[in-house]
Image (spheres, coloured by chain):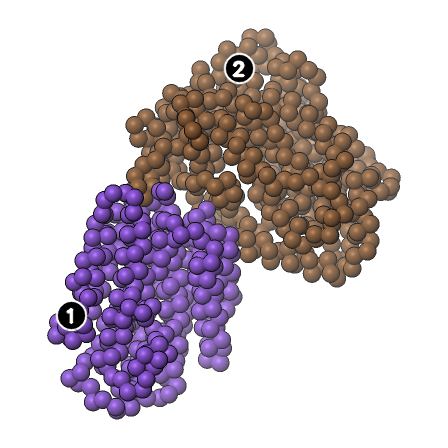
Chain colours: A purple, B brown
Amino acid sequence: MAMLGKTANGLFWMFRYLERAENTARLIETGQRIALTRLGDADDEWKSILQSAGAYEAFKEEYDDVNKDDVIDYLLRSKTNGSSVLSCMNSARHNARLVRTALTGEVWEATNAAYMAARELLARKVSERDLPKVLGAIRQRAALVRGMTHGTMMRNEIYDFARIGTFLERADNTARILDVKYYVLLPSVSAVGTSLDNVQWETILRSVSARGGFRMEYGGGAGPQEIADFLVLDRRMPRSLAFCTRKLRENLTHLGSGTGQSLPSQKLVSHMERMYLSHDIEAVFDYGLHEFIQKMLGQFRELAQQIEIDYRFYE
Amino acid sequence: MTTPVFDEMWGQDETLRDPYRGFDAWFSGEDLGRLRAKQREAEDLFRLTGITFNVYGRAEAEERLIPFDIIPRIISNAEWQKLTRGIEQRVRAINAFLYDIYHKQEIIKAGRIPAEMISRNIAFEPHMIGVEPPGGVYTHIVGIDLVRTGPGDFFVLEDNARTPSGVSYMLENRETMLQMFPELFSRNRVQQVQSYPSDLRRSLAACAPNRVEGKPVVAVLTPGIFNSAYFEHAFLADQMGVELVEGNDLRVVDGKVAMRTTRGYKPIDVLYRRVDDEYIDPLNFNPESSLGIPGIMDVYRSGGITIANAPGTGIADDKAIYSYMPEIVEFYTGERPLLQNVPTWRCSEPDALAYVLEHLEELVVKEVHGSGGYGMLIGPTASKKEIATFRKKLSARPANYIAQPTLALSTVPIFTRNGLAPRHVDLRPFVLVSPEGIRVTPGGLTRVALKSGSLVVNSSQGGGTKDTWVLED
């Protein structure tokens, strides 16, 4: 089966934006949580959140200093911020309309409903009191789309591109969080057990919805190395780099099956797994955690570009 | 207006008409509060489905819903059968006329229509001269606009032989009614419309070029997501299970029109285009167009692809040609026209113009190439100032206009805050043409003027739509 290159492109971005909307909502939740526990420098935390969302530079152009209300509003509702929750929902729906014929009615309606809900919830500045409810509703809406996708879509090329968009965005998101916070995970500087460290670690786990999984796996007595291992290499943790990369490889392999040839994107993703994700975490620390994350971010970017070319997204 | 208006539920003398009996029995047992809630529920359903149209000339091409009225319009099978015969006759004549116009032009030689009606008409397409469209079909999809003035009196208002829209509303209106009032459909036996998409696909496939072996590849061509009818384009492609393409997805490869897929270019056999003639091929028509496919006309002329509807069909639904339709029907079918034409004054003719200028306050005056209810004058409801302004426009370019008497359009009930109230309607049945035959879907799009007394049903001017029922016998 083959599908329109334009449709593949639209699916890829529709699901990237849905994933991004959810990730941004989760980042805001994390920031708010830290601010409320009053540990550490709150404004500093909001700066990290902006950086993790890839929005710090653009934010600085509009605002003189970083404060909670502005950051939340910028990440939630700003029209100039293409990655704000509202912009993401808008873009997700726009792409869904473009690829309407590739979606089941259920997925389209869930997406349209998610967009309509977001537009209503985010029509005005969200008060602190309403924030948890609004963020919860947005994550739930995004989860409904994912559920409908899972439950009603054929497992064909269409599904592959939807998944590829999802996992590239997710991998990128986890990598960016690690990129901003890598230093708290370095063994050399961490005085294990200080409450500040505990908060920092929790921030990281929270921002990728990994607290529960981590606790189940390691119990209470684990430190930065285990966290790094969990987020980078764990193959069962659905937001780790290794997990996302494996999913990308599987979907790209499925896309390529039957063509009798291995496309460059497929080669690249196999290379990424072999080179970077099949060692243990000590090797990663030896390589340098920061350098490693930077390398991975670059590889994900390159992979996205290669997929665009291999599958004729554009003319 | 002096003639009494014909109401499709209550006739001209307040007697309940047969097709509405089942509905009336149901309605009289209904609670108005519940129906009001249902009306809101219908709007929510439409919003969720995303059945919207984009409004031109507004920032960010705002999406809007066409108002939907929950009261069905009901037509008996006998009325429908009669109407269908008239529609089939008219559509056969239109296709024969188009073939003739682009080949021997017998009708002109016979002196039945003046030569300049064709040669000077901007809708005439010289690129189509001598072209044999696959299957001999020009108008694969037609949406004839009809109005009614009495129990058996239907008039054709427009033939819409280019790219008629609105069929998605016919389907979604029915879907919504089925969801909201299942009990109404158990009480009334309504003929189904839901097979339209599969009928459309079959009909298009039956018109594939001769070269095609096996199942033809069909695609819908849309101008894109900002077009006012984008929802419908996506809807039809989805329901037919075919690709929805834009000009930049297509190019001519090895003498065929092909679409860019994730695995290279794949040829298309039948293109249901919702792009106007002048934009379809920048090499052959408007060079500025980015909506079309350079060279598609060359492929078409060599029989490599079916374009539906064929380029150049606009010559048949032009408002000046319209006035010749009775002659056209007779000339090609040898029969008397079964459907009536609205008497039409061609303002290009001096006598007609003189009459029209004298009777502006009684007449409807339309632009020959206008559509969407824009640029027209409705004499009886226009102000003195509007008439004066229009008089100047008409005198300056008379050939640009035709005029018709104001018809006493029939009314059907709509649901208002205070219960049922009559409003004027028109009807657009949808017709499919292929070598296998002509098929008229039982039903169609009923457009309704929501304002009391108004005769303008266009959605761009505040009109709404209704579900249209054709009952079984």
Q: Nearer the viewer, residue B464 or B243?
A: B243
Asked whether, in this view, residue B449 is left or right of residue A169, the answer is: right
The chain identifier of the residue carrying mark 1 reads: A
Q: CA distance from mark 2 to mark 1?
A: 75 Å
> What amino acid type is highlighted by mark number 1?
Glu
Horizontal and vertical percent for residue B229?
A: 51, 43
| Quadrant showing the C terminus of chain B | top right
Residue at the extreme left: A286
Q: Nearer the viewer, residue B272 or A241?
A: A241
Could you tell me if residue A214 is visible in this image?
Answer: yes
Q: Which residue is mark 2?
A: B100
Secondary structure under tag 2 reads helix
The chain identifier of the residue carrying mark 2 reads: B
Answer above or below: position of B257 versus B190. above
Could you tell me if residue B398 is visible in this image?
Answer: no
Q: Which residue is mark 1?
A: A291
Residue appearing at x 32%, y 36% in the figure: B265
How packed mark 1 is, by other alpha carbons closer than 10 Å (few <14, some 14-19, many 20 or more), is few
Answer above or below: position of B103 versus A286. above
Q: Nearer the viewer, residue A238 or B356?
A: A238
Residue appearing at x 49%, y 44% in the figure: B238
Residue at the extreme top: B110
Horizontal and vertical percent for residue B78?
A: 76, 31
Query: Are the residues tagged 2 and 1 within 8 Å (C-beta)?
Result: no
